[in-house]
Amino acid sequence: MKTLYEKKSLAPNDYKKFETAYTNSQQQYAQAQKGAQQEDKAAAKARVEQAEAAERIVRKRLSDSTLSLRLAALCRSQHRGGGDGESGHRHFYDC
């Protein structure tokens, strides 16, 4: 490009556009080679920790609700023979 500009085959405005695009490309390439910035890494780590905490909360809630449902089913299913009911069975709830 520079040789075309020097030989007056390329307009000065076009040369500046190409030169600016080239400089921007070099800067973007240098940033890509450096990798993610520290702020980006810290933000990603915070999002991971937040997601893990949310997962723990949901698992705890699921565990609590599962336990209470099992306990309720156990309470309803316990009965012993005896004498108060129609079938001669007496129901005991130890809950």
Image (cartoon, rainbow, N blue to C red):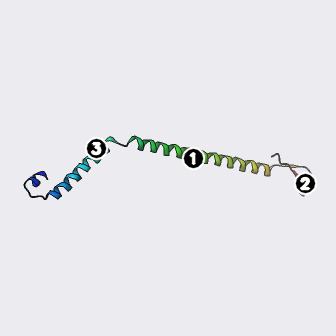
- Marked residue nearer the N-terminal end (3 or 2): 3
On the rendered structure, is 72 left or right of 80? left
CB under 8 Å between callouts 1 and 3? no
Please name the residue shown 49% across and 46% down the image.
47
Mark 3 is surrounded, within 10 Å at the Cα level, by few (under 14), some (14 to 19) or many (20 or more) other residues, namely few
- Which is in the foreground here, disc 2 or disc 1? 1
Residue type at numbered disc 3: Ala
- Marked residue nearer the N-terminal end (1 or 3): 3
Residue type at numbered disc 1: Glu
User: Residue 80: horizontal and vertical position, in percent?
Assistant: 86, 48
Residue 30, numbered label: 3
Q: Name the residue under label 1.
A: 55
Residue closest to the far left: 7
Q: Name the residue under label 2.
A: 88
Frontmost residue, 54 versus 28: 28
Mark 1 is surrounded, within 10 Å at the Cα level, by few (under 14), some (14 to 19) or many (20 or more) other residues, namely few
Please name the residue shown 49% across and 43% down the image.
46
Mark 2 is surrounded, within 10 Å at the Cα level, by few (under 14), some (14 to 19) or many (20 or more) other residues, namely few
Distance of label 2 from label 1 (alpha carbons): 49 Å
Distance of label 3 from label 2 (alpha carbons): 86 Å
Q: What element carries label 3?
A: helix
On the rendered structure, is 67 left or right of 7? right
Frontmost residue, 87 versus 94: 94
On the rendered structure, is 42 left or right of 86? left
Q: Is mark 1 on a helix, strand or loop?
A: helix
User: Residue 11: horizontal and vertical position, in percent?
Assistant: 13, 59
Q: Is mark 2 on a helix, strand or loop?
A: loop
Please name the residue shown 61% across and 46% down the image.
57
Please name the residue shown 9% across and 58% down the image.
9
Residue type at numbered disc 2: Gly
User: Residue 77: horizontal and vertical position, in percent?
Assistant: 79, 51
